Image: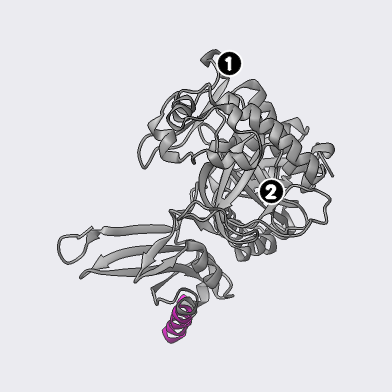
Amino acid sequence: MYWQKELETMEDARIRRLQLKRLRETVRAASRSTFYRERFQQLGLSPEDICTLDSLRKLPFTTKNDLRQAYPFGFLAVPKGRVVRMHASTGTTGRSTVVFYTRADLDQWTDLVARCMVMTGARQGDVFQNMTGYGLFTGGLGFHYAAERLGIFTIPIGSGNTRRQIHMMREFETTVIHCIPSFALYMVHSLHAMGIDPRRDLPLRIAFLGAEPHSEHVRRKVEELYGVDAFNSYGLSEMYGPGVAFECPAKDGMHLWEDAYLPEIVDPGTGEPVEDGAKGELVLTSLGREAMPLLRYRTGDLTAFCTGECGCGRRHRRIRRIIGRADDMFIIKGVNIFPTQVEEALLGMEEVGNNYQIILKRKDYTDIMTVTVEVQERFFRGDPQEREQLRRRMAKRLREELLVTPDIELLKPGALESTGGKAVRVVDKRDIYEGGISDT
């Protein structure tokens, strides 16, 4: 199924021609913003210098810090009277980052998310329960407007309130949900406590999972527990929101809509392009965006281009599952570690439950990594020695994956609470020194 078949199945040569046309328009539009006008002047560049797709590399990267420094209107490329909406980050690490939209921007964004939903089989006649946040967060409204454009019965319940979510799912026979993966797993405890088997008692058939990196094990677990097809969703507010890339039923990477985004994958340290298929940081240039075009935006997300064509017939390049963020990586004893490595190692064990958290501390000038992980209830009812053996197996498995041995703390199911927002996978307390004055 297609929403915009001509665009979705466009051959490579036509995609490149369309990208070049839209890139040149985008660079001209960006030059009308204060930030890019000043940046071009500093570099001695004009929009006419960007005349091929390769010449995009003449431009420096744009970063999240640039967005913060230019707050609030430094990236706005149209008169404020043409802006019809804004979204913003929470600003927990400094100033907020804001994103502006014209009416045409909202239309393009809605169509991009609609493409994604149709590609997975969502259609008129479904009941869509949107279980992510609304307001300044882009995830909720992005899917909401796309579902309505498709004529789908939409329940804008938002995030959290697990029992109400379940009540709505049963009362209105929800068939499609959008939520973060950690909340989908957390909600299973409440379903079972209420005597509800989601496979038997709910008519769910599709789950859209996004907003936080997750492993293939997590996707399979959601599919097994709920009896659904779960699809990986990728987006970021700086590029409208959800709908940048999405899985098709083949589930072999996410189709990145190249008529709306010009992607690059670079070495996060050097900024140089990596070989095709190699892992690196995703860099995106918006195409066709009016209010706030962004050039070579460093997403911080680590992925790789897929090789070969997809059997679904769509020709847009695919990216692999996001394995983490360049700034999510932490270092223990000189080893680079990503939370998804822990997830892959632990959630593949049948004894493990649905959630985990990594806690980093510093004691006597030594970094200590503790992994708290939910396991099956039976380990807290039986022989404590059996629980200790499980803990040791986990430590050994993580040692093989990470090359360091963390402490392991086993928890009962549901002990790590989820509110429906992004799961907090890493709690770094290394600035709180246990045994003296912190050296950080």
- At label 1, the amino acid type is Arg
Disc 1 from disc 2: Cα separation:
30 Å
On the image, the x and y values in percent for residue 326 come to 46, 55
- At label 2, the amino acid type is Phe
| Element under disc 2 | strand
Res. 97 image quadrant: top left
Res. 78 image quadrant: top right
Q: How many numbered discs?
A: 2
| Element under disc 1 | helix
Identify the residue at horizontal 71%, vertical 31% (top origin).
21
Q: Is residue 393 above or below residue 338?
A: below
Q: Which residue bears the numbered disc 1?
A: 82
Q: Which residue bears the numbered disc 2?
A: 246
**Residue sitting farthest toward the top:** 81
Res. 84 image quadrant: top right
- Badge 2: few (under 14), some or many (20 or more) residues near its Cα, within 10 Å? many
